[in-house]
Image (cartoon, rainbow, N blue to C red):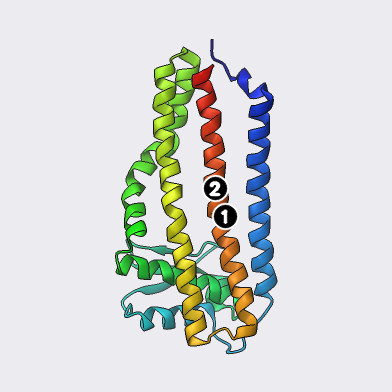
Amino acid sequence: MYGWGYEADPVWLLIIVLSLVLGFSTQLYIKSRYKKWNKVANTVGLTGGQVARKMLDANGLSGVGIEVVSGVLTDHYNPKKNTVALSEEVYRNRSVSAMASACHECGHAIQYATRYTPAVARGALVPPINLTSNLWMFVLVAGVMLNLVGMIWAAVILYAVTIVFQLVTLPVEFNASKRAREFIGSYGYIPQEESRGAKSVLSAAAMTYVAAALISLMQLVRILSYTRR
């Protein structure tokens, strides 16, 4: 009979601990990188909002709006509204971190405008991921409680959509950071001595998505263990 007692298995516990450590350390790393370079003002005195506008306009995206949103590290591109949403700190700050973060989100706007293939694929996966992100857990619990391996495999398939989504997200995020670095380098909004800081912030942000994908893969191993037992 299947049961939640499997979590007492040393392998299960190891996976859980590794997932928690990886998630926590990644968040700590990105916050430390952002905080460090958020104290360093860029030498040209441009705010995140100003450099975002320049990057969008330079790529022929004058129609893409920029809005301020609440929170910290809540910056994102909204394809439905066709706007780059920047946290107030990023929008108004003249730091290296603010400009790097703003340019990264503009990179996403450019991806959608140019129909960048991974970004298009990721967008197509949003509807199914909204359905499967929570459904797989209910199916798994039902399969375990009813001792139905078929339902557990159904949960595996549903959860696999999450992993595919995260794997497709990786090239999207790396490419957005690449576009940000190229714009910063080409237009000189962050001089050479400050480019290292921008790269550090962008690389740390990308590692968040790498960690999320690894955690999901470890979670998949946990789910698959039910089918073997």
User: Eyeballing the image, is 209 above or below 139?
Assistant: below
Left or right of 171 on screen, residue 209: right
Is any atom of residue 24 visible in this view?
yes
The image's mark for residue 36 is none
Residue extending furthest top?
A: 1
- The residue where tag 1 is placed is 208
190 or 48, which is in the foreground?
190
Q: Amino acid at mark 1?
A: Thr
Q: Residue at x 59, y 81 (%)?
A: 94
Image quarter (top left, top right, bottom left or bottom right) of the N terminus? top right
Q: Amino acid at mark 2?
A: Ala
Disc 2 vs disc 1: Cβ atoms closer than 8 Å? yes
25 or 133, which is in the foreground?
25
Dividing the picture into quarters, in which one does residue 96 lie?
bottom right
Q: Residue at x 69, y 76 (%)?
A: 39
Q: Secondary structure at mark 2?
A: helix
Distance CA(mark 2)–CA(mark 1): 6 Å
- The residue where tag 2 is placed is 212
- Please tell me how many numbered marks the rendered image carries: 2
Q: Residues within 10 Å of mark 1 (few under 14, many from 20)?
A: some
